[in-house]
């Protein structure tokens, strides 16, 4: 069997492989395409501003691919079932790619075909993970509903694109992002303290992490409230107050995980850095909605590129090592990757207030830093994702 054939078989042997690969490369190419559109004054032909195409593709392209890779890998572990691989995984990958091509060529295809290609991915993903989750019900079963809610947001966005309704499209994108933030709150609330405690034990230290059930429940409830109030009362005083409460709850929660004790391990501290953008973004949102402070105007990028983008980078780089039989330790160049993305987010969020006369250059610099960080990930992890496990086990 040829090396090429072996690499293809390996790529589609487990769910994280194709989707962590696609998410990484799309993070590079998607932002590069957006920078080209933005700097050349080009518009998207879908009846909506190009900025909404950019937001949609990062949410339903980049983030959705990462979610697929995570769920297709985690569900077999949660349920003790065989991992997803082979032709079903190939078909799911092609559906994701079809959606990206359709949205890029929106002016050359009938809208019904574009909608069909774009809206097929998430229901098929939900169907794949539903059977093992429903056969062995556990606390993760509600994730099926989250996927369908995310799909519903995409349905509304596509309807808005068909009617050239940017307000409706914006509402759909906000709802979708808030669903992702809820996922980060729930899943991140499990893995960040767990991985931190494991790392501290390996180093011979006592973890001493603080976690309170009441705070955990209150934080999740606050994020559900954020989702609901943004759906029905966006930009209101209620929205600002709930964002403030959620941000404070998230900050207190994160402080109990002792991230400062993991500074010697980039694969651990990046989880804390990624999660930190969540309380920061929520507090910036509260400042902007309640106080109309200009320096907080780009809170949305803090939550999307910061919390979602960095948590995805952190989880992909860790899970790809663990599930290919490698040591859970990243090279120094990956630490640079983490820092480049974090710096890009910081410039995107705070740069316009610090350098108001250089907005175009600020956007360009932030985008290039993001591209550089994810390009490092792609260069390092593409061979890993294409090669069999080092220990010879399936995966």
Image (cartoon, rainbow, N blue to C red):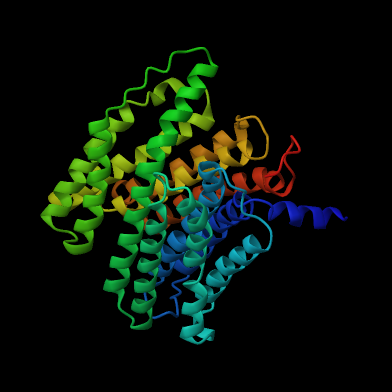
Toward the viewer: 259 or 342?
259
Q: Quadrant of the C terminus?
A: top right
Q: How many marks?
A: 0
Q: Quadrant of the N terminus?
A: bottom right
Q: Residue at position x 43%, y 48% from top? A: 137
Work out whether 161 lies above or below 79.
Answer: below
Toward the viewer: 167 or 393?
393
In the image: residue 199, left or right of residue 165: right
In the image: residue 392, left or right of residue 200: right
| The image quarter in which residue 273 lies | top left
Q: Residue furthest front?
A: 135
Q: Residue furthest right?
A: 1
Spot occupied by residue 158 in the image (x, y as percentages of width and height): 39, 75
In the image: residue 10, left or right of residue 34: right
Q: Residue at position x 57%, y 40% from top? A: 319
Spot occupied by residue 210 in the image (x, y as percentages of width and height): 32, 23
Q: Residue at position x 36%, y 68% from top? A: 152
Q: Residue furthest bottom?
A: 110
Spot occupied by residue 292 in the image (x, y as percentages of width and height): 16, 52
Spot occupied by residue 99 in the image (x, y as percentages of width and height): 53, 71
| The image quarter in which residue 208 lies | top left
Work out whether 378 lies above or below 95.
Answer: above
Q: Residue at position x 17%, y 47% from top? A: 242
Toward the viewer: 334 or 228?
228
Work out whether 140 lies above or below 5.
Answer: above
In the image: residue 271, left or right of residue 15: left
**Is residue 357 visible to us here?**
no
**Is residue 157 visible to us here?**
yes
């Amino acid at each position: 069997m040829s090396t090429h054939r072996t690499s293809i078989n390996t790529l589609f042997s487990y769910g994280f492989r194709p989707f962590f690969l696609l998410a990484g490369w799309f993070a590079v190419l998607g932002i590069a395409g957006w920078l080209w559109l933005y700097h050349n004054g080009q518009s998207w032909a879908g009846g909506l501003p190009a900025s909404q195409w950019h937001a949609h593709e990062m949410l339903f392209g980049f983030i959705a691919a990462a979610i697929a890779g995570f769920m297709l890998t985690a569900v077999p572990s949660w349920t003790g079932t065989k991992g997803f691989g082979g032709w079903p995984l190939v078909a799911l990958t092609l559906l994701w790619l079809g959606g990206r091509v359709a949205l890029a060529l929106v002016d050359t295809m009938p809208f019904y075909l574009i909608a069909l290609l774009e809206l097929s991915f998430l229901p098929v993903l939900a169907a794949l993970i539903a059977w093992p989750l429903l056969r062995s019900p556990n606390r993760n079963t509600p994730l099926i509903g989250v996927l369908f809610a995310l799909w519903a947001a995409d349905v509304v966005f596509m309807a808005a694109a068909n009617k050239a309704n940017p307000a409706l499209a914006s509402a759909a994108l906000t709802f979708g992002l808030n669903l992702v933030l809820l996922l980060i709150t729930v899943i991140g609330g499990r893995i960040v303290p767990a991985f931190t405690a494991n790392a501290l034990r390996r180093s011979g230290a006592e973890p001493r992490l603080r976690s309170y059930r009441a705070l955990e429940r209150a934080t999740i409830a606050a994020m559900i409230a954020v989702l609901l109030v943004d759906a029905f009362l966006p930009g209101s005083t209620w929205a600002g107050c709930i964002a403030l409460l959620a941000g404070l709850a998230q900050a207190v929660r994160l402080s109990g995980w002792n991230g400062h004790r993991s500074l010697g391990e980039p694969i651990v501290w990046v989880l804390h850095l990624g999660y930190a953008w969540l309380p920061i973004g929520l507090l910036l949102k509260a400042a902007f909605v309640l106080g109309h402070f200009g320096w907080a105007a780009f809170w949305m990028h803090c939550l999307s590129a910061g919390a979602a983008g960095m948590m995805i980078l952190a989880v992909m780089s860790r899970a790809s090592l663990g599930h290919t039989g490698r040591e859970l330790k990243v090279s120094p160049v990956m630490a640079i990757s983490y820092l480049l993305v974090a710096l890009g987010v910081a410039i995107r969020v705070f740069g316009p207030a610090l350098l108001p006369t250089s907005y175009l250059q600020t956007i360009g610099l932030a985008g290039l830093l993001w591209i550089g960080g994810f390009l490092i990930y792609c260069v390092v992890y593409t061979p890993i994702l294409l090669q069999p496990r080092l220990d010879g086990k399936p995966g």
